[in-house]
Image (tube, rainbow, N blue to C red):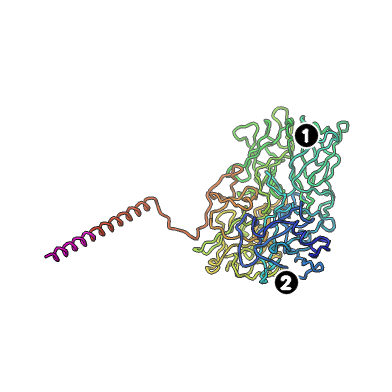
Amino acid sequence: MSPLFARRSKRGLLGAALASAALFALPAVAGAAPAGGAAQAVTSNPDVVSSSFNPAVSPPNTSNICFDTEVQKPSFLPSVGGGGGAWVPVPGSVNLRGYAGTSVNNPILGDIDLGFNGIFPMLAKVDPNNDKCVILQWLPAAPAGLGTQHIDDWTSTEVRTGFVQDVFGRYNAPGAAALDGSSITPHAGSITGLNLLGASVDTSSNRIIYSFDRYVNGGANALVPAALRLPNAGLFGFYTQDGTLVTGVAAAAAGKNVIVQFADGTVPGGGAVGDAVKVGTLFGATSDSFGKLGALASLDTANLPGAPANDRPNIDTATPVAGLAGAYILHYDKQIALPLLGIPLSIFGVTENGAFVGPALTVGRPGQDPNSVLVKFDGTIGSAAPNQLTDTKIVRIVDFGLSVTSLDIGNLSALGDVPVRTPNQQKGFTEGPDLTKVTKDTTLNTTTYSFDQPVSAPASVFGAVFQPARVGILRNGTQFPAFPIGGNTLPTPLLAPGLLAGLLGQPAGNQITMLFSHDQITSTVGGALVRGFAALPGDVASFGAIGDVTSPAAGLIGPGLFPVVNMSQSAGLTSNAAAEVPAAGGGSTPSGSPSVTPSVTPSSAPAAGGSSTPAATVQSTAARPVTTTSSVKKAKKAKKAKKAKKAKKAKKAKKAKKAKKSRRSVKRHH
């Protein structure tokens, strides 16, 4: 029985008060953490402020979502559980969101909630100790063997309109909050699948334990092809110092680890793990998380601490070439010969969702450095060539070991990978565009929306996603309908009157500016996006307000985009209208404190050496005339002269008055 079914009496299976007290000590507003680090939205409707998950003290598979006012069960839904006050939310009205790409297994799905995949709660209940918060009871495991529930593998909690209502019957505004307790943290080169963090060697059993940042599937996820459900021992291995590659013979998943057994040196292909100097996997494991569709690990390697390098050339750094999309300088730990015919066909870029860009075709010698090569993904074969925006989604470069040879004896390079960007995968952000800031301009009657990464609007590029009926403003007194009746678009009073015609453009690659009426702008208190759930006329996808610039995987379709879309989100107004710098690789500004820096175009990647150029800024609502230094000096001088003239006039008048008084006095004495 779920703890949410329990009555408040001590006779319940688990008293609701006890359950909620153990769940969270979070106040409704203090420590608020809207998704995307955006300013808190404050309207007359219930607004999302925070969300939390604490497995150490909370009942199993529970989290909460808090609002800025007292909330209650929506009146159109019945109570369940014999008086405990719980209800069954409308499926899709509240969801866990995060990073759910599917790598090469399902490269086109991205961060998608398919509904049936179980990332919505089976029960909800207003916290009896804090009526601004709702406790959510999630399924412990998916039906039909679709994985295990791992709440901490997600980063945000999203609510659609009508999930709750206030004491006056007003439904909540759309919104999302950072999920406190999420285990997702940023790592250089991270993809949305599994990322190798390190390994430990057990010489007594001739095993190596490979540690990942995500939960590893042990065979339950039926959405994953049978051959991929268990960790594949043959896709895990290690290099010895002489460059010999040894692969595993058996493997088992244990939480976020894979334990791999190796044959000893008496068996052909075996070897002692004590000789390992470099370890890695090649698509050897998939995610176990309920709702993530079996996201794969990629080519992921790690040098063992303190071990010497192996005899093969090992890629050790990759640097984007400033201003040249798709061009990278690769550096190896040994002097290398150029590849056969000058074509490095085993060099690929890996995007944040695990898809491959490449192979690289162009090659050169930067500065005649014998350890380096310059490559470019030019789109001649394989995937389309990246442009200044889509190049930012490449987070690592991989070498499958057939592209370069050592200059001395011709050893082929070792399997290897190096990061080129650090996507800011952490609580409050998702793989899709996250709203980080909203500003308004009462002079132009516009609202500008800033995101954590480059976006594409309108759908001028093949495959781009932009739906103006899901992008709008926030105003007090809005009557939001309950999901799913009205959750597919925002209410008309919140939309730009011209919809698509209201899109004025993109001041920067991570921004869009929409035109509204003067009456709308003067009453605007924030901005909102909804994810939607069904296709609208002209839609490229069945949901989403706006998409990122993720490119198709190699070999799928031609040039264009296969974007990941936004979640439902609200944000209050921010007075500073400067464009934000989106982090490289689809990353985000830190949750809760979006950084505002001198604006650069989103195609630049400062952390990875990309070029930067000034980006357009949004006009402030308190714009003042621009004055030069000389005009300021002239104004001060004129003011000083005017003051002196006034003082002289006053002195003269005083002197004349005194003289007149003196004459009168003399006259009286006569």
Residue 492's label in the rendered image is none
Residue 431 image offset from top left, x and y in percent: 68, 53
Q: Is residue 600 above or below residue 444?
A: above
Helix, strand or loop at mark 2: loop
Q: What kind of secondary structure does the magenta stretch mostly adopt?
A: helix
Query: Residue drawn 76% across and 46% down?
Result: 297
**Along the horizontal axis of the image, is 128 left or right of 635?**
right
Residue 239's label in the rendered image is 1
**Along the horizontal axis of the image, is 2 left or right of 395?**
right
Question: Where, by quadrant of the figure, is residue 283 drawn?
Answer: top right
Q: Nearer the viewer, residue 159 or 600?
A: 159
Residue 323 image offset from top left, x and y in percent: 57, 45
**Amino acid marked by disc 1:** Tyr
Q: CA distance from mark 2 to mark 1?
A: 63 Å
Q: Is residue 36 above or below residue 322?
A: below
Give the mark toward the camera: 2 or 1: 2
Residue 472 image offset from top left, x and y in percent: 61, 64
Q: Is residue 332 above or below residue 80?
A: above
Q: Which residues are magenta?
A: 654-670
Residue 75's label in the rendered image is 2
- Pointer 2 with pointer 1, Cβ within 8 A: no
Helix, strand or loop at mark 1: strand
Q: Nearer the viewer, residue 126 or 663?
A: 663
